Image (cartoon, grey):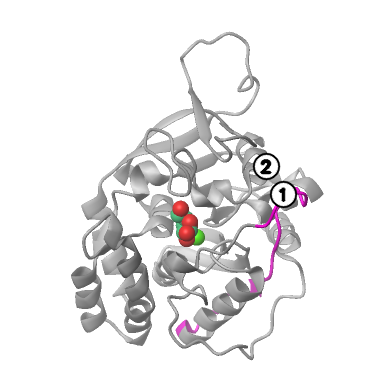
């Protein structure tokens, strides 16, 4: 059984990934921690509680960071054109959800849960990396106590999605991402190289909804405007970014990877760019030296990944 803490900014593709984690028979979802990104942390937390209620998820929700780890970074507008004004494709979501939040901030929830399950917890982080960076800052020892870390973020041999060189989750808090990627733990980076080619069509989702129960039908409804948004680059389909990170947890054989130290550019026109120093390549001394070798996904068997998502979501 994979014990997981899901760090997320729901978020349309975050919602699909949450249902995948909830329904996969080999995954034990210990907690959901929220972060700002696709909307404010107030909104992403409300959305997490909404999905927990609608999908009857037992895992607690802990509210996390609402600003970048370097508070002097300027605020950026929310990506309402992608995830809607409410973060869930502008379907009807009550303003408040009558469910309790965990009393701890997300980073403390992460620390406590990792310490209570040494060597067993995988952190699956699919929003900005702020909560993970705060957890490391407050308790650096957790780096040796987690089982692993899988993030959706970054891009290596393909363009970014918020700038020509940067992906949204990393660009949204580059300093936090650099802390996470250079810490002495094993990070698997599931970025746009693999997620941007893993697209689910509107009709594939509609067929899933027709075959599935109320949670899958809700997922279909909240994904419609996200699919509309992608119309400028793909036809009648959406990239299922965050689910790819969850699939890696249970089916890593569906991915091709390279390894090496990864750094994040902080500032300037390449703000938020992720750069791999491939293991085995020699360079003069530089800014990648002395950091742990991480795993970067560069290839994916998208059809099999989509099939696994489908069978998992329909497994209830
Ligand atoms: C990532 O950014 C967010 O919009 C998505 O939820 C995903 O985690 C893709 O770049
Ligand atoms: Ca996300």
Task: State whether residue 184 is above or below residue 237.
Answer: above
Label 2 with label 1: CB-CB less than 8 Å: yes
- On screen, residue 174 above or below 223: above
Q: Position of residue 38 (x, y in %)?
A: 53, 64
Q: Nearer the viewer, mark 2 or mark 1?
A: 1
Residue 66 located within the stretch drawn in magenta: yes
Q: Quadrant location of the C terminus? A: bottom left
- Assess whether residue 83 is covered by the magenta stretch: no
Q: Which residue is mark 2?
A: 175
Which secondary structure, mark 1?
Answer: loop
Numbered mark located on residue 116 in the image: none
Q: Could you tell me how far apart the alpha carbons at marks 2 and 1 are, in whole angstroms?
A: 10 Å
For image coordinates 19% across by 76% down, the residue present is 207
Name the residue beneath numbered marker 1. Answer: 73
Task: Look at the magenta stretch and give its main secondary structure.
Answer: loop
Q: Is residue 309 left or right of residue 281?
A: left
Residue lying at the far right of the rendered structure: 138
In this rendering, is residue 222 above or below 65?
Answer: below
Q: Image height check: is 191 above or below 227?
A: above
Q: Which residues are magenta?
A: 55-75
For residue 90, side relative to residue 298 (left or right): right
Residue 1 shown left or right of residue 132 in the figure = left
Rendered residue at 77%/75% (across/down): 103
Crowding near pointer 2: few (<14 within 10 Å), some, many (20+)?
A: many
Q: Is residue 214 visible?
A: yes
Residue drawn at x 62%, y 43% is: 174
* Sequence order check, earlier mark of 2 and 1: 1
């Amino acid at each position: 059984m994979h014990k997981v803490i899901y760090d997320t900014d729901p978020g349309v593709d975050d919602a699909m990934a949450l249902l995948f984690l909830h329904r996969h028979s080999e995954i034990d979802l210990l907690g959901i921690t929220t972060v700002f990104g696709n909307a404010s942390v107030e909104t992403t937390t409300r959305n997490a509680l909404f999905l927990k209620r609608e999908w009857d998820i037992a895992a607690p929700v802990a509210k996390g960071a609402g600003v970048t780890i370097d508070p002097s970074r300027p605020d950026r507008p929310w990506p309402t054109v992608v995830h809607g004004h409410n973060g869930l494709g502008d379907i009807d979501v009550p303003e408040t959800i009558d469910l309790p939040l965990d009393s701890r901030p997300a980073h403390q929830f992460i620390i406590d849960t990792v310490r209570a399950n040494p060597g067993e917890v995988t952190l699956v982080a699919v929003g900005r990396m702020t909560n993970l960076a705060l957890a490391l800052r407050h308790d650096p020892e957790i780096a040796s106590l987690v089982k692993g870390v899988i993030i959706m973020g970054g891009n290596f041999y393909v363009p970014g999605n918020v700038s020509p060189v940067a992906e949204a989750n990393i660009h949204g808090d580059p300093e936090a991402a650099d802390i996470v990627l250079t810490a002495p733990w094993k990070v698997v980076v599931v970025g746009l190289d693999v997620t941007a080619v893993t697209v689910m069509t509107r009709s594939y989702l509609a067929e899933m909804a027709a075959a599935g129960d109320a949670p899958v039908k809700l997922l279909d409804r909240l994904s419609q405007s996200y699919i509309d948004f992608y119309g400028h680059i793909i036809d009648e389909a959406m990239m299922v970014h965050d689910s790819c990170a969850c699939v890696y947890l249970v089916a890593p054989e569906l991915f091709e990877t390279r390894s090496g130290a990864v750094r994040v550019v902080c500032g300037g026109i390449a703000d938020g760019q992720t750069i791999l120093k491939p293991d085995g390549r020699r360079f003069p001394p530089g800014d990648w030296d002395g950091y742990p070798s991480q795993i970067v996904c560069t290839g994916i068997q998208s059809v099999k990944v989509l099939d696994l998502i489908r069978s998992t979501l329909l497994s209830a």
